[in-house]
Amino acid sequence: MEGGEPHGLRSQKTDPGRGPDAVIEDIGRMVTAATQDVLGKESGVKNKVLGAGIGCPGSIDRSTGVVRTTPNLGWIDYPIRSRVTSLLDLPTVLDNDANCATYAEWWQGSGKGAEHLIGITLGTGIGGGMMLRGKIVRGASGSVGEVGHMTIDYNGRLCSCGNRGCLEAYASGSSIALRAIEGIRSGSKSILTELVDGDLDHISSALIFEALKLGDEYAHEIITETAKLLGIGIANLINTLNPDVIVVVGGVVGAGDYLFQAIRSEAQTRTFRSAFQRCDIVPGQFPLTAGIIGAAGIFISELTDS
Ligand SMILES: [Zn+2]
């Protein structure tokens, strides 16, 4: 199956305070504008577009097209699929955004064609997805891939899910920044303090990667610890699931080769040798667009399956 190249793109920051209906109307306007870029203003979207794929964060009920909960947006039991379907007047499929990103990397990205692939999305939180022989593995209640909430320290940091010691509480973009801020407040010296003019709340994971490239010792320490924690999480996945590829997607990929070498090295010390040797741990090919490409890919795959 070919395809997967974006022809028109639009993006916009989501303002959760405006409520889901307003966000969906924005999405409708962006879809119309992006398709008109390709097809021309006069062309009816309905006549030229097969349908729409939606990638949405949170817990999804695919059979009803309802978002059960989205912790970061605050939506509860919102019928997103029917809203988008009626707005665009097109057939629509809905999936979790991490499943979409994983599908994109299997379909056209770093894990193209892998038999058993795990995707890990590192952003504000940590998500994931799993594919076996071209199919997304979903599990009994559809929550396969919540790799961010595997416990790596039973007594550890409090996670947004309420549990303690989840991988996400250490290695998501926001947790990396938080750990760095806490360390500086406790006396660690870093160029980060100057980069934000002393306003530590402005430290982000992207800025820590910049500080790392500038040779900052403290940024090096934070990223090394992050790689160790990610390596532990990835080792758990390799030992239990024996994948041939693990693709890491998202802004954290901006840390570059150093992060991946350290992740691989940690994972190697904690895995069965044969399983580690058979598993490529690679950065994603679509750090910004994997979710979009994957949502379209899942729509096409369901069209051809039916
Ligand atoms: Zn958690």
Image: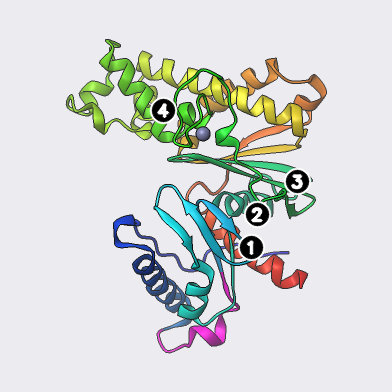
Q: Quadrant of the N terminus?
A: bottom right
Seen in the picture, residue 188 relative to 304 is either above or below; the reply is above
Residue in view at x 74 percent, y 71 percent: 304
Q: Nearer the viewer, residue 57 or 13?
A: 57
Residue 136, image x and y in percent? 71, 53
Instruction: Name the residue type under label 2.
Output: Gln
Q: Residue under label 4, please give it.
A: 176
Q: Residue under label 3, please give it.
A: 114
Identify the secondary structure beneath mark 3: loop
- Rate crowding at label 3 as few (under 14), some (14 to 19) or many (20 or more) other CA atoms within 10 Å: some
Upstream in sequence: badge 3 or badge 1: 3
Residue in view at x 27 percent, y 10 percent: 187
Upstream in sequence: badge 2 or badge 3: 2
Q: Residue under label 1, please give it.
A: 297
Q: Are marks 2 and 1 in contact (CB under 8 Å)?
A: yes
Seen in the picture, residue 218 relative to 98 is either above or below; the reply is above
Instruction: Name the residue type under label 3.
Output: Ala
